[in-house]
Image: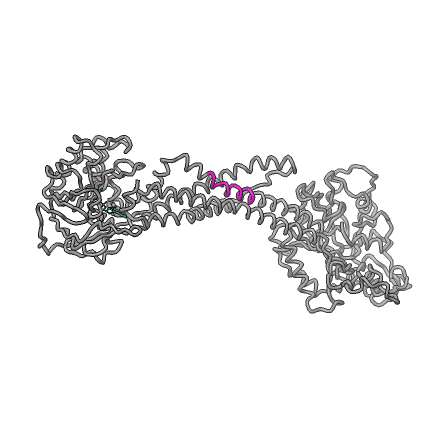
């Protein structure tokens, strides 16, 4: 069965060498009860450990069923310990945090015996050792003798061929010792039992054979055996601990020290808590800033006018850096263009550029509004009388052209933005709420914009033909449904014999012309409370489509043709002095479809950046003269806040991250302590056949539980902490629910916490797995 051939095991400590086994040769029968006797330190335990595969020999050979173990790998030893050997120790070596049944089942759990079978076997073994009635007890509730019985049950549960007992009665009174010896004696009937003892009497009374040891050598053998049976087969079944067993072992272990585990989980969750709060705050602020950005930016669109001021173009105005100091030595003056004059730039907006703008990515900006200097020939019937009206907030009731034109340029225009992608929201619906009527659906639908108190510009109403005085109230239905006829140039202007044109005197005929378009006030809108956009000024607002249709109608009208040919204004007869003035006059008459200004609205800084990049790309490779210069009033402020927010978040997360690393180190220390505390358990597990990696798993499982626990705890507390933080912020800033933790961030944090703690605990786990089984078992 077992044969030791010239086995040597020396221990070297400092300069001294202890010959624990000094050329020991010994053979054992398949079934016998052998007692090893000898003085303390003679090498008995060492031999037992080597036979059990807990310790390695230096030289010689150990043959198991005639198979040499010289080339055994760790996994072979693990399997041998698990399948073939059962251990009984003087100090029982039970795992205190497991139940009696779990202790007995542990070895079978390692070798993958099914759960029913191993419970059955464990119960059988416990019955056999006389503990059938005590199965429900905890280890700590047992007497010494009972503990040793559990240990014996554990050793024989899987029916090993060899039972190794190291002073099994050493800690028991004589009466209990007899009971235990009887039990072992009975067990030895069908297997090899090797027992180390100091007790001569017990050895003589119970064993079949006594081997005496002294100084690592065999002194005497009462019943030597010459192993001649060479036909025995030796087979090993590999062991493997499942993750579930590892988790269970660690979980029950953690349960025994609840207080410490909870405190540790809490301490290491502090890092997670702080990161959760920082992320929640920055996430919330980001959303708030996003909203504010949207609001601010729709107030400050990117503006492209026919005449631009160049302050926004870095390259155009360069400062002379050199001549700042030596003004005393200068004897000349410098002629220089006026700053404001130098800063103006005529943008050559043409159909090319307009095309380019329609290709802006709708995700960056979906709303572009065009202001055209087109005049509108509008007529309305008021109290049975046809009168000329207009969409303007100018007070002058006359038809002064330059005033009309100026009303249509710059901020506060009354053209609502065009959408590049109709499917992506609706500027009016998103930013304006309906006070009455409906949102416009046709190009000829116009709306009246009012402020939050339902006030609108009195001139807008007067110019529409309403006879109103300041603070007068008008019913919604007086305004909604107002019909206005839009007359084309040919039907509106008549040519005088002088060649000049003038509006027709017969307004009724013009009003009733079937070619007229019918414009209708369909709704009253005010800006959403949370949007606060003021893109549209109080007064009438209409779509750019309407302006475009007018231009289409009038592009080839008589008056436009005449104006194109004439150097005089065909309405006033006055000479036109500049190209600019001519363009403007033509535009007013509908002879020019180039907008006077274009406003591009974006929702946030990133999109705005993208749009600006897109606009800059148009200028690439163009001469200064041909460049189109835009104005971005909100630009500087916005990039500043965006960057600042990012910066603050990074710094705070970095600080919080430090505490995360601290907790990782803490978990490392804790696992290390746990490894020290559980050294005995590691020894037991190894004695039962656990592999190195199984031991690592047990401790990895422990850190996994801790990491997951502290992650969940941290995120949970983080979420809770956001409530008082939000309440505080509400008091300070009046903003509701600012802090707001993204669930994705929460999950990532839990994963990070688990991963980091496992990382922190992995080194001690590895150390644990490397622990020498015999040393581990010797530890107290
Ligand atoms: N890990 C070790 N490192 C150094 N020396 C060791 C180690 N293990 C055992 N020894 C030494 O080897 C010798 C044999 O020890 P062993 O434990 O086998 O003796 P023993 O006969 O079982 O003694 P006891 O009856 O007191 O248990 C002793 O001198 C002991 O100090």
Which image quadrant is residue 250 in? top left
Horizontal side of 318 relative to 236 (left or right) equals right
**Magenta part of the chain:** 266-279
Measuring 75% from the left and 38% from the top, which residue is drawn there? Answer: 475
Does the stretch in magenta take in 275?
Answer: yes
Measuring 24% from the left and 54% from the top, which residue is drawn there? Answer: 76
User: How has the structure been colored for display?
Assistant: one colour
Measuring 69% from the left and 41% from the top, which residue is drawn there? Answer: 436
**In the rendered image of this protein, does residue 453 appear above or below residue 760?**
above
Horizontal side of 70 relative to 645 (left or right) equals left
Residue 311: give x, y in percent of width and height.
76, 58
Query: Could you say which is closer to the camera, residue 179 or residue 105?
Result: 179
Which image quadrant is residue 97 in? top left
Q: Main secondary structure of the magenta part?
A: helix
Which image quadrant is residue 59 in? bottom left
For residue 555, say whether it is visible: no
**In the rendered image of this protein, does residue 130 appear above or below residue 465?**
above
Residue 598: give x, y in percent of width and height.
73, 57
Query: Could you say which is closer to the camera, residue 174 or residue 565?
Result: 174
Horizontal side of 279 relative to 582 (left or right) equals left
Query: Could you say which is closer to the camera, residue 512 or residue 119?
Result: 119
Residue 183: give x, y in percent of width and height.
15, 36
């Amino acid at each position: 069965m077992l044969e030791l051939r010239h086995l040597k095991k020396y221990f070297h400590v400092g300069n001294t060498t202890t010959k624990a086994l000094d050329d020991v040769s010994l053979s054992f029968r398949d079934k016998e009860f052998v007692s090893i006797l000898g003085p303390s330190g003679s090498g008995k335990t060492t031999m037992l450990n080597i036979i059990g595969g807990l310790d390695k020999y230096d030289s010689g050979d150990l043959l198991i069923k005639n198979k040499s173990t010289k080339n055994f790998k760790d996994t072979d030893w693990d399997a041998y310990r698990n399948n073939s050997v059962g251990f009984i120790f003087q100090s029982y070596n039970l795992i205190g945090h497991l139940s009696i049944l779990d202790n007995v089942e542990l070895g079978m759990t390692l070798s993958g015996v099914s759960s029913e079978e191993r419970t059955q076997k464990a119960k059988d073994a416990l019955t056999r050792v006389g503990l059938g009635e005590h199965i429900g007890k905890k280890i700590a509730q047992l007497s010494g003798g009972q503990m040793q019985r559990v240990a014996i049950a554990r050793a024989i549960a899987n029916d090993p061929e060899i039972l190794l007992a190291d002073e099994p009665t050493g800690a028991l009174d004589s009466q209990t010792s007899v009971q235990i010896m009887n039990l072992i004696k009975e067990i030895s009937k069908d297997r090899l039992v090797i027992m180390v003892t100091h007790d001569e009497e017990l050895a003589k009374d119970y064993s079949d054979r006594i081997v005496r040891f002294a100084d690592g050598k065999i002194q005497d053998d009462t019943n030597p055996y010459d192993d001649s049976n060479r036909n025995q087969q030796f087979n090993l079944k590999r062991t493997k601990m499942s993750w579930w067993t590892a988790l269970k072992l660690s979980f029950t272990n953690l349960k025994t020290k609840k207080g410490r585990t909870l405190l540790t989980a809490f301490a290491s969750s502090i890092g997670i808590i702080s990161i959760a709060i920082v992320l929640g705050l920055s996430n919330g602020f980001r959303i708030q800033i996003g909203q504010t950005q949207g609001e601010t930016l729709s107030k400050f669109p990117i503006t492209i006018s026919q005449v631009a001021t160049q302050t926004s173009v870095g390259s155009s105005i360069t400062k002379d850096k050199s001549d700042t100091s030596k003004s005393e030595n200068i004897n000349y003056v410098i002629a220089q263009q006026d700053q404001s004059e130098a800063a103006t730039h005529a943008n050559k907006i043409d159909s090319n550029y307009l095309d380019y703008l329609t290709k802006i990515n709708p995700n960056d900006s979906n709303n572009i509004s065009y202001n055209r200097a087109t005049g509108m020939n509008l007529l309305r019937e008021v109290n049975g009388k046809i009168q000329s009206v207009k969409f303007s907030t100018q007070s002058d009731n006359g038809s002064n052209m330059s005033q009309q034109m100026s009303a249509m340029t710059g901020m506060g225009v009354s053209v609502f933005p065009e959408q590049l992608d109709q499917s992506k929201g609706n500027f009016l619906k998103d930013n304006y709420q309906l006070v009455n009527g409906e949102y416009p659906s046709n190009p000829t639908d116009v709306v009246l914009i009012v402020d939050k108190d339902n006030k609108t510009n009195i001139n807008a109403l007067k110019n529409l033909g309403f006879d109103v005085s300041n603070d007068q109230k008008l019913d919604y239905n007086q305004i909604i449904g107002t019909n206005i006829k839009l007359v084309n140039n040919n039907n509106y202007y008549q040519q005088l014999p002088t060649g000049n044109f003038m509006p027709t005197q017969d307004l009724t005929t013009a009003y009733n012309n079937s070619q007229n378009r019918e414009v209708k006030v369909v709704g009253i809108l005010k800006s959403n409370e949370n949007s606060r956009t003021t893109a549209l000024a109080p007064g009438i607002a209409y779509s750019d489509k309407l302006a475009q249709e007018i231009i289409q109608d009038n592009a080839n009208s008589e008056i436009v043709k005449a104006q194109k040919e004439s150097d005089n204004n065909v309405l006033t007869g006055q000479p036109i002095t500049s190209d600019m003035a001519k363009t403007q006059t033509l535009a007013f008459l509908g002879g020019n479809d180039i907008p006077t200004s274009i406003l591009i609205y974006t929702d946030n800084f990133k999109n705005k950046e993208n749009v600006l990049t897109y606009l800059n790309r148009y200028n690439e490779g163009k001469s200064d003269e041909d460049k189109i210069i835009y104005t971005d009033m909100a630009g500087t402020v916005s990039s500043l806040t965006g960057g600042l927010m990012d910066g603050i978040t990074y710094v705070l997360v970095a600080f919080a991250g430090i505490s995360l690393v601290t907790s990782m180190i803490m978990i490392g220390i804790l696992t290390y302590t746990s490894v020290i505390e559980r050294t005995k358990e590691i020894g037991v597990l190894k004695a039962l056949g656990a592999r190195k990696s199984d031991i690592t798993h047990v401790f990895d499982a422990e850190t996994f539980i801790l990491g997951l626990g502290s992650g969940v705890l941290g995120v949970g507390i983080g979420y809770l902490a956001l409530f008082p933080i939000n309440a505080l912020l509400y008091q300070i800033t009046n903003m509701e629910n600012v802090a707001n933790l993204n669930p994705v961030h929460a999950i990532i944090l839990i994963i990070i916490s688990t991963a980091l703690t496992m990382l922190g605990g992995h080194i001690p786990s590895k150390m644990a797995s490397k622990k020498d089984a015999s040393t581990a078992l010797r530890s107290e």
